[in-house]
Amino acid sequence: MKFIIAKHLEITGSTNEDARSGVHGEVFVADAQTAGRGRLNHSWHSAPKRNVIMSAVLSVADLDFELAATFPLVAGLSVAEAVLGIAGVGAPVAVKWPNDVMWNGKKLAGILCQRHGDLVVCGIGVNVLERDFPEEIKNRATSLALEGVECSVEAVQSRILDVLGDNYEEWRRNGFGAVLQRLRRYDFLRGKYISVYQDDGGAHPTSGLCAGIKEDGTLDVGGVSVAAGEAHVDFVVGMRKGSKDET
Ligand code: BTN
């Protein structure tokens, strides 16, 4: 499927809100947001005109609830594949379940999928030209420019929409299995000791050795299937957390 840019605003609150008025195949783009939203009630920082800020509207009508629930992972794979296509084979791109896109262990892109009836609003933020992150995320965030990849915001945006459109069709046609095979190549958490938290409070995480993403899109953490949450790496086998080789 091909997406259509329905609206491109200089500034808006959140493109995920704008996209609530959209129909299947429409994309809402902005140069800046005043109330950019992240997963689990986080906010999303993005300086004007430096990064991809867009929300695509996709139909999940007629899909099983279980299949529809795997869409956020399809979105994460799509952004990772698009970035790899731009940066070239061998670029250290990974997907941190459910759909953070990482570069060498730092966050390059975030995705917020919100379901509204038969539609999913898929909000995507990719750090492209940003070189100066706020102090509190400086050590955890990166951009294509900081990693030496020269590319315009528009080029990244259109590459992602091409890949997302193709992957969405494949996912609808063949189910999550085919997509999962490719997603596993990018799995950032598999083989690491992790804790998955349900909220910012940090209480009662599920902790253990991560065995990767399962057929239903949940994460295997020490034999327990986790359906949602935010994962933190506690320990990488053979490497102390915080050592200079840590990924
Ligand atoms: C996250 O990593 O927590 C998800 C971040 C999602 C950010 C994008 S930017 C475009 C769209 N509009 C929003 O308000 N959020 C998403």
Image (cartoon, rainbow, N blue to C red):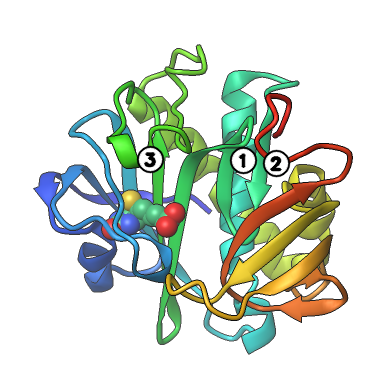
Q: Nearer the viewer, mark 2 or mark 1?
A: 2
8 displayed left or right of 187: left
Compare residues 243 and 214 and report the one nearer the observer.
243
Disc 2 to disc 3: CB gap under 8 Å: no
Identify the amino acid type marked 3. Answer: Ile
Q: Mark 3 highlights which residue?
A: 137
Disc 2 to disc 1: CB gap under 8 Å: no
Q: Position of residue 247 (x, y in %)?
A: 70, 34
Q: Residue at x 26, y 72 (%)?
A: 20
Q: Quick check: is the Cβ at mark 1 less than 8 Å away from ligand 1? A: no
> Marks 2/1: CA distance?
25 Å
Q: Position of residue 131 (x, y in %)?
A: 33, 21
Crowding near pointer 3: few (<14 within 10 Å), some, many (20+)?
few
**Sequence-earlier tag: 1 or 3:** 1
Compared to residue 56, the image places residue 67 above or below, namely: below
Compared to residue 191, the image places residue 140 above or below, namely: above
Judged from the image, the quadrant occupied by ligand 1 is bottom left
Q: Mark 1 highlights which residue?
A: 80
The label shown at residue 241 is 2
